[in-house]
């Protein structure tokens, strides 16, 4: 197992090598922006799917809707730029909401983001599988299997370390950006050259029957799904090389600029070409086919699109563990999420994220259109809380230039809240689980916090006088006259207890008498207590006896120690061949008050 782990995960890294695992701006852009950049592969399509309800004539509305999405993107980019400088230690929406609105607001943001990062992975790999099946329709029935395999690969890749995964992922991300810019350039060239008939689309401004404000808002909210992942950089500031806030800000601005250009370019080409969404071929695939034909460049674009959609899941793998660390430090989730693995990554968070994503992919059958509304709604709740939190911060602190900062965050808060509200109203059938799992997570967070808060006072040293203990009684459950029992008895004698009591439980009265006779010949100086169990239970009669001894020992200020003999088999699978009675005894006694539990192992050589 150790060799397999070294081969798959890599050699362990020293803690002093942590700084070597920090990200440069170019690597950070690839690993933390892949989620946002990849959304151009499905964000424009979501707008067209909504507009298609009233016909292809309404597709021209995608242009003003795209402008609205870009406005929201600008507001979010500048807002999170302020978050990065105000909270350089990371935490994003969780920390901003907690410190400026309240603990529960922070927990809502944190819980929603944890789930959203799991959805990031599920949506990204599912969309990547869709891109592959668009190019190779014969694989359509294997979407779920492909998505699960992709998640497993990404989980292993991230367990190998942040720097290593960023190095591998940088090339596909930048190749995707380059290939899309080439595609957009070719498409615009063909339009300017008159190669694309104007009859493919309806002129902008053409009245279309059936278009309502509700429909347009629904399309705008759907298109805003392209903005998921914008907050990831603010959560992952500690992953950047020094100076962390400066490098994080530059990466955020670069991501925003690339996303705006790619998103607007795809929306424009889809409108001008008159592309209609269908379940068998993505919008990007249709644009590529119209622009360059179904030649080698088409397959390059589809390959790069599939790759970045799959690798976009890496944003979740980067941000989820760091958010979990912040929640764990505050005591709201288990402390194991603060533990770094062999490769200095937060392995427990990475593994949990991978498992959660696989479960979602299987539950939703790998259907991107079913996951995206839940995904987008989950992220716009933290968006709204983060903007509102920054508004309160500026109103409370009023630093230099606070009015401009307040304006940016106010615009962001209003638009984010509007988008979240539209999702709830228009796609309630998809997003209703949020109303259950977010409050449930907040309750769980509080229960965990309450547990940790109760432990501290109990472990803290105080001036109380401990009772003086007068002795020690040792009880040894025995199953026969064996080397294992002899080892345990010898160990007990070295501790010089006041009394050693061997206890033998039998389901047969005749067996009791025979064992007592053998014991007197073997260990006459050790007291033996035999217990008859008519209902063939080993633990119940033993624990009742221990309870009686404990009660009497407590009256005389004596310790009660139970020594459990345990043989250790040569191979792990041999455990299945034994009844594990010692394990049952230990499990029960571990939770008994005032009983000290000691295990004496006896290792089998064959």
Image (cartoon, rainbow, N blue to C red):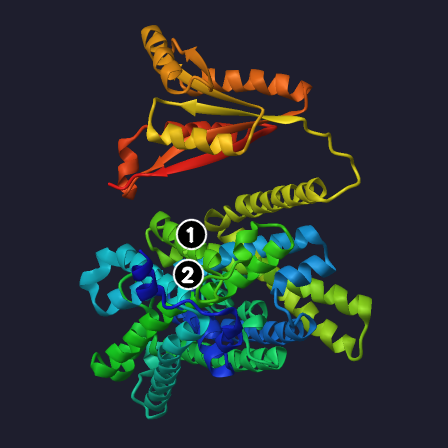
Q: Residue farthest to the bottom?
A: 193
Crowd band around label 1 with a 10 angstrom C-alpha radius: few (<14), some (14–19), many (20+): some
589 and 466: which one is in front? Answer: 466
Mark 2–mark 1 CB contact (< 8 Å) = yes
Q: State the image quarter where residue 506 is shown.
A: top left
Quadrant of the frame with the N terminus: bottom left
The answer to whether 294 is drawn above or below residue 360 in the figure is below
Find residue 454 and report its horizontal and vertical position in percent: 68, 41
Can residue 409 be seen? yes
From the viewer's perspective, tell me whether residue 472 is left or right of residue 285.
right
User: Marks 2 and 1, Cα distance to the nearest angstrom?
Assistant: 9 Å
Dot 2: within a 10 Å radius of its alpha carbon, few (fewer than 14), some, or many (20 or more) residues?
Answer: many
Residue occupied by mark 2: 121
In the rendered image, the vertical position of residue 219 relative to residue 335, given as above or below: below
Q: Is residue 591 above or below residue 367?
A: above
At 46% from the left and 20% from the top, the residue drawn is: 526
- Give the residue number, with chain letter if any, for mark 1: 356
Q: Nearer the viewer, residue 102 or 435?
A: 102
Left or right placement of residue 605 versus residue 41 in this view: left
Question: Percent x, y for residue 595?
Answer: 57, 28
Q: Nearer the viewer, residue 285 or 437?
A: 437
Q: Quadrant of the C terminus?
A: top left
Please give the name of the residue rendered at 21% of the width and 61% of the height, measured from the top-left corner.
Answer: 139
Q: Nearer the viewer, residue 606 or 526?
A: 526
Residue 357 percent coordinates (x, y): 40, 55
- Element at label 2: helix
Residue extending furthest left? Answer: 138
Element type at mark 1? helix
Residue drawn at point x = 55 percent, y = 30 percent = 496
């Amino acid at each position: 197992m150790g060799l397999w782990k070294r081969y798959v995960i890599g050699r362990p890294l020293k803690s002093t090598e942590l700084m070597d695992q920090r990200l440069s701006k170019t690597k950070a852009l690839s690993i933390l922006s892949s989620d946002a950049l990849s959304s151009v592969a499905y964000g424009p399509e979501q707008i067209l799917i909504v507009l298609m309800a009233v016909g292809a004539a309404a597709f021209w509305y995608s242009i003003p809707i795209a402008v609205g999405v870009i406005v929201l993107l600008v507001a979010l980019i500048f807002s999170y730029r302020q978050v990065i400088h105000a909270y350089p230690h990371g935490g994003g929406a969780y920390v901003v909401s907690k410190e400026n609105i309240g603990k529960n607001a922070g927990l809502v943001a944190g819980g929603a983001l944890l789930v959203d990062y799991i959805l990031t992975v599920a949506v990204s790999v599912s969309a990547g599988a869709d891109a592959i099946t668009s190019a190779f329709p014969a694989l359509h029935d294997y979407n779920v299997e492909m998505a699960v395999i992709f998640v497993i690969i990404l989980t292993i890749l991230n367990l190998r370390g942040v720097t290593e995964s960023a190095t591998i992922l940088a090339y596909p991300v930048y190749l995707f950006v380059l290939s899309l810019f080439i595609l957009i350039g070719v498409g615009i060239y063909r339009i300017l050259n008159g190669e694309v008939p104007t009859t493919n689309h309806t002129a902008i401004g053409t009245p279309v029957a059936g278009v309502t404000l509700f429909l347009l808002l629904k399309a705008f909210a759907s298109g805003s799904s392209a903005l998921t992942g914008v907050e990831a950089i603010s959560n992952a500031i500690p992953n950047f090389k020094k100076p962390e806030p400066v490098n994080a800000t530059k990466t955020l601005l670069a991501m925003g600029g690339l996303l705006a250009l790619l998103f607007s370019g795809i929306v424009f080409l889809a409108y001008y070409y008159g592309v209609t969404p269908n379940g068998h071929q993505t919008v990007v695939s249709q644009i590529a086919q119209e622009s360059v034909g179904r030649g080698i460049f088409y397959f390059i674009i589809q390959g790069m699109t599939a790759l970045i959609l799959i690798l976009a899941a890496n944003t979740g793998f980067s941000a989820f563990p760091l958010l979990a660390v912040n929640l764990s430090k505050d005591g709201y989730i288990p402390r194991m999420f603060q533990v770094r693995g062999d490769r200095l990554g937060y392995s427990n968070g990475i593994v949990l994220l991978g498992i959660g994503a696989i479960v979602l992919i299987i539950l939703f059958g790998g259907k991107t259109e079913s996951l995206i509304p839940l995904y987008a709604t989950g992220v716009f709740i933290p968006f709204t809380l983060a903007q509102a939190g920054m508004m309160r911060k500026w109103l409370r602190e009023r630093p230099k230039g606070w009015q401009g900062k307040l304006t940016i965050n106010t615009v962001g808060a209003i638009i984010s809240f509007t988008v979240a509200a539209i999702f709830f109203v228009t796609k309630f059938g998809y997003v209703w689980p949020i109303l259950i799992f977010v409050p449930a997570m907040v309750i769980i967070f509080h229960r965990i916090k309450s547990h940790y808060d109760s432990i501290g006072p109990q472990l803290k040293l105080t001036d109380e006088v401990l009772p003086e203990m007068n002795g020690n009684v040792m009880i040894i459950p025995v199953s026969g006259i064996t080397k294992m029992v002899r080892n345990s008895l010898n160990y007990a004698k070295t501790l010089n207890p006041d009394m050693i009591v061997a206890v033998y439980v039998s389901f047969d009265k005749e067996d009791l008498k025979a064992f007592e006779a053998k014991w007197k010949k073997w260990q006459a100086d050790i007291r033996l207590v035999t217990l008859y169990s008519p209902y063939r239970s080993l633990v119940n009669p033993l624990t009742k006896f221990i309870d009686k001894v404990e009660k009497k020992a407590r009256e005389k200020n004596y310790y009660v120690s139970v020594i459990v003999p345990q043989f250790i088999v040569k191979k792990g699978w041999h455990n299945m061949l034994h009844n594990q009675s010692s394990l049952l005894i230990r499990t029960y006694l571990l939770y008994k008050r005032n009983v000290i539990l000691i295990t004496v192992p006896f290792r089998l050589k064959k």
